[in-house]
Structure formats: structure tokens, C-alpha cells
């Protein structure tokens, strides 16, 4: 089958990989002019880790990754008030855990298909018209082409979802926070292999030292701190972050100064996508486009890889009966995804507490993570992936 995939992030190239293995002809359509490395830091583990292993990309993922040793929570004077060793994750996940920039994971997934898949950069789908024999894809930069199937892997703000199911607001569930991320060179101080974080009620800043003298920053804050419409331009984003974090204490002034020199600041609502169906006719959705779990699940990339694998596998198993394949793909994965979304929503309040008491409780709880039984109780359930990964002949 000729299959158009909108989005060359994590889910899109992974789907292309498995479709190639199953003998299909995927075409990736990516709106960015080039595929980027870097970006915010992600933790990578769980069922998606097994998919990466099956794709043969794990050694490269680990090579680009960081074996973060510690989560360290500080007060405004830089004194430790909480945190834990990440050995707790390694123990619970059988050492199958690594942290790396999202773009670096995406690049390794893409490398597995490089030169074997048509990739159209700097363009996107502007219209979809389903007809008896397929779907006509109209490109934003001009031109039309017919495909047997179209898959939206174009992230939280999916264009394919919008074109097929309607505006995002129908499916977007706000978690009540915003997130911003950027990285800069030469920042001091540096703490190697540590996730160093500082919080005041409703506001949290973290930094992670990267190779080549770079540091990645992650800022999370309560949505009510944004007055007026969401900031859009780079200058509006920076101005909002200044307004919210200028007086927050700790290293905030120097972190904001570092941000001022950055040309690229990620800034978005923390949201989930919940839909009644992940496909309609010849159009399907995977990854964040279908069912974004949000950063609070800490597993969106792994789930995106899993969705790609299962969708390609179900197409193979159903002998290219795309309707049956899309239904089975959703049926297999929906319970897992919904449980991850629920866990992420429950975790929101302890990730960036809105009160002094909430912060204190969170800090004390992180100290107890050294006790295996307490750690199992606090995060054991969220780390488990209740999914028996199907085996497909591809
Ligand atoms: C701050 C933050 C921290 C996170 N932390 C973690 C973590 O610790 N662990 C984890 O596993 N996950 C984490 N996530 C979630 C994870 O990044 C996503 O779940 C994952 O990237 C989803 O993959 P995707 O391929 O569906 O979407 P994306 O990775 O968002 O890729 C979508 C692609 O589609 C492209 N695109 C968008 N619109 C169009 C269009 N109209 N036409 C063509 N192309 C388009 C984009 O340019 C992009 O390349 C985090 C997310 C955030 C924001």
C-alpha cells in the first residue's frame, strides 16, 4: 500500500520503518525544513524501549543518551530539600532506562529508514479528500497525490486530526500547566548527570548538563499565571517567562538571561488528547496526534513507537484490510493509553505543587523513594506497562 505519514517526529519514522518491513511504500511529509536533533530531555523506557530494541537502534540511543544518576530538589539558597537516586528507576525497570534529547531519539528512529523512504520536507497536508480507491492528499506548497491510507503522526497540534475530525479544542484536555524548554551553551554552574530542580508554589525550574558544554532547562508553571492569550512569538514567550520567573529566586535571573540569548524556546500548554476513535475511513492517527499523554506520563515517545509497531503489525495481520487493522490497533492499545493518561493527570499536582504545603509533602515523599517498598507504592504502578506486546511476521 502507498501510505502517507504526516510528521517525521518519533511516531512517523517508526511507522515508516515497520511499514517497510511489512512491504509497504510509506511517504513522510514533515513541515519543518530539516529534521532537528536536540530539544527537551526525555526519559525513555517501558514497552517503547522494547520496540527500539527490535528496531536495532538501542545501542545508538544509549550512545546519545545520559545515565542521569540523581534527581536533586533545591531550595532558594541551593540547599538540598529532597530528591532521590535514579537507581530506583533502574531497579524497577531492570536497567532498561535512558534519558536523551527528544530530537536525538527522533534522529535515531529516522536513521533506521534513511535512504529507504521518500521524505518530503518543508511541506504539509492542506486538504484530504477520500474517494472510492484511496485518499487524495493536497499539499500546502502545491500539488496533489493519491494514497491508499493517510496516517497523522503530526503531534499534539495535528493537522491531519484537524482536517479529519475537526478543531483541536474538541479533543484537548488541559492539565492546568504550561511548559517551556530551551538549551544554551556555557551555563554555570554545571552538575553532571543530575536533574537539578527548584520550585516555588506553581513554578518549577530544572536544569540538566549536556555534552559540549550545553545545559537544557525545563520550566513548568501553573496555567493561571498566564494572563491573557497564550504567547505565540519568541519575544512573547520570553516576556511571559520573565514575568512569571523573574522574582522566583534561586538561579532564575541567570537562567532567564541565558534564555534571552536563545533563538529557540519551546513553549506549550501541558495537554492530553482524548478521542472517541483514532481513525475514520482511510485516515488513522498515532502518537501524540491520537492520544497525547503529556510530559507528565514521561513515556510519550515509547508509546508512540508502540503505536507505530502495532498499527503496521495489524495491517500485516489483516492482509491490508485497513479498516480492520485500524480498529484492532486501537482496541489493543486504548486501555494502556487511557491508564497512562489517567496516571499523568493524577501526577500533575505533585509534579509542580501549587502550595507551600504541597511542595513540602512532595519533597518529603521523594526522600522516601530510597525505601523500595515506598518507591513501589509511589511509582511502581505508573512504571508498569500492562500490555502483552504482539508478535507480527514483519
Ligand atoms: C517538555 C516535554 C517533556 C517530555 N518528556 C517526555 C519524557 O520524559 N519521556 C517521553 O517518552 N516523552 C516525553 N514527552 C512526550 C514526547 O515528546 C511525545 O509524546 C512524543 O514526542 C510524541 O511523538 P510524536 O511523533 O507523536 O510527536 P512529535 O514528536 O511531536 O512529532 C510530530 C512531528 O510532526 C511534525 N508536524 C507538526 N505539524 C505538522 C504538519 N502540519 N505537517 C507535517 N508535519 C507536522 C512536527 O514538526 C514533528 O516533527 C515530553 C514532552 C514535552 C513537551
Image (tube, rainbow, N blue to C red):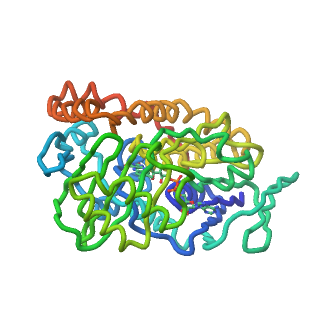
Residue at x 40% of width, y 41% of height: 296
Where is residue 134? Give x, y as percent: 81, 55
| Residue sitting nearer the eye, 70 or 361 | 361
Give the number of callouts. 0
- Going by the image, does 222 lie left or right of 355? right
Residue at x 64% of width, y 53% of height: 152
| Residue sitting nearer the eye, 356 or 370 | 356
Residue at x 16% of width, y 64% of height: 189
Can you tell which quarter of the image residue 262 is in?
A: bottom left
Can you tell which quarter of the image residue 15 is in?
A: bottom right
Residue 56 seen in the figure = no
Task: Identify the image quadrant of the N terminus.
Answer: bottom right
Residue 222 seen in the figure = yes
Where is residue 336? Give x, y as percent: 49, 33
Where is residue 58? Give x, y as percent: 35, 57
Where is residue 242? Give x, y as percent: 37, 60
Q: Residue furthest right?
A: 132
- Going by the image, does 372 lie left or right of 9? left
Amino acid at each position: 500500500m502507498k501510505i502517507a505519514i504526516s510528521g517525521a517526529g518519533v511516531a512517523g519514522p517508526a511507522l515508516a520503518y515497520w511499514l517497510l518491513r511489512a512491504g509497504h511504500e510509506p511517504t513522510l511529509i514533515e513541515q519543518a525544513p530539516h529534521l532537528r536533533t536536540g530539544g527537551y530531555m526525555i526519559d525513555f523506557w517501558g514497552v517503547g524501549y522494547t520496540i527500539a530494541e527490535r528496531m536495532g537502534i538501542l545501542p545508538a540511543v544509549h550512545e546519545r543518551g545520559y545515565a542521569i544518576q540523581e534527581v536533586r530538589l533545591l531550595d532558594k539558597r541551593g540547599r538540598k530539600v529532597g530528591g532521590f537516586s535514579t537507581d530506583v528507576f533502574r531497579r524497577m525497570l531492570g536497567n532498561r532506562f535512558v534519558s536523551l534529547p527528544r530530537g536525538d531519539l527522533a534522529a535515531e528512529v529516522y536513521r533506521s529508514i534513511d535512504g529507504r523512504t521518500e521524505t518530503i520536507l518543508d511541506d504539509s497536508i492542506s486538504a484530504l479528500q477520500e474517494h472510492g480507491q484511496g485518499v487524495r492528499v493536497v499539499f500546502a506548497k502545491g500539488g496533489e497525490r493519491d494514497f491508499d491510507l493517510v496516517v497523522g503522526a503530526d503531534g499534539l497540534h495535528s493537522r491531519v486530526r484537524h482536517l479529519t475530525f475537526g478543531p483541536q479544542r474538541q479533543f484537548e484536555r488541559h492539565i492546568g500547566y504550561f511548559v517551556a524548554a530551551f538549551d544554551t551553551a556555557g551555563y554555570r554552574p554545571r552538575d553532571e548527570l543530575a536533574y537539578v530542580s527548584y520550585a516555588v508554589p506553581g513554578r518549577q525550574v530544572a536544569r540538566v548538563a549536556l555534552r559540549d558544554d550545553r545545559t537544557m532547562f525545563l520550566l513548568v508553571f501553573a496555567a493561571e499565571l498566564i494572563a491573557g492569550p497564550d504567547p505565540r512569538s519568541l519575544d512573547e514567550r520570553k516576556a511571559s517567562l520573565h514575568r512569571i520567573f523573574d522574582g522566583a529566586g534561586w538561579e532564575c535571573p541567570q537562567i532567564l538571561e541565558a534564555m534571552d540569548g536563545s533563538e529557540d524556546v519551546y513553549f506549550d500548554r501541558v495537554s492530553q488528547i482524548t478521542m472517541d476513535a483514532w481513525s475514520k475511513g482511510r485516515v488513522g492517527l498515532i502518537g501524540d496526534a491520537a492520544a497525547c499523554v503529556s510530559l507528565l506520563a514521561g513515556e510519550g515517545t515509547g508509546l508512540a513507537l508502540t503505536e507505530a509497531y502495532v498499527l503496521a503489525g495489524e495491517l500485516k495481520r489483516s492482509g491490508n484490510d485497513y479498516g480492520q487493522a485500524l480498529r484492532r490497533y486501537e482496541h489493543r492499545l486504548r486501555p494502556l493509553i487511557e491508564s497512562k493518561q489517567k496516571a499523568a493527570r493524577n501526577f500533575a499536582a505533585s509534579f509542580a505543587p501549587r502550595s507551600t504545603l504541597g511542595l513540602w509533602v512532595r519533597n518529603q515523599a521523594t526522600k522516601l523513594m530510597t525505601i523500595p517498598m515506598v518507591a513501589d507504592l509511589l511509582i511502581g504502578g505508573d512504571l508498569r506497562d500492562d500490555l502483552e506486546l504482539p508478535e507480527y511476521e514483519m
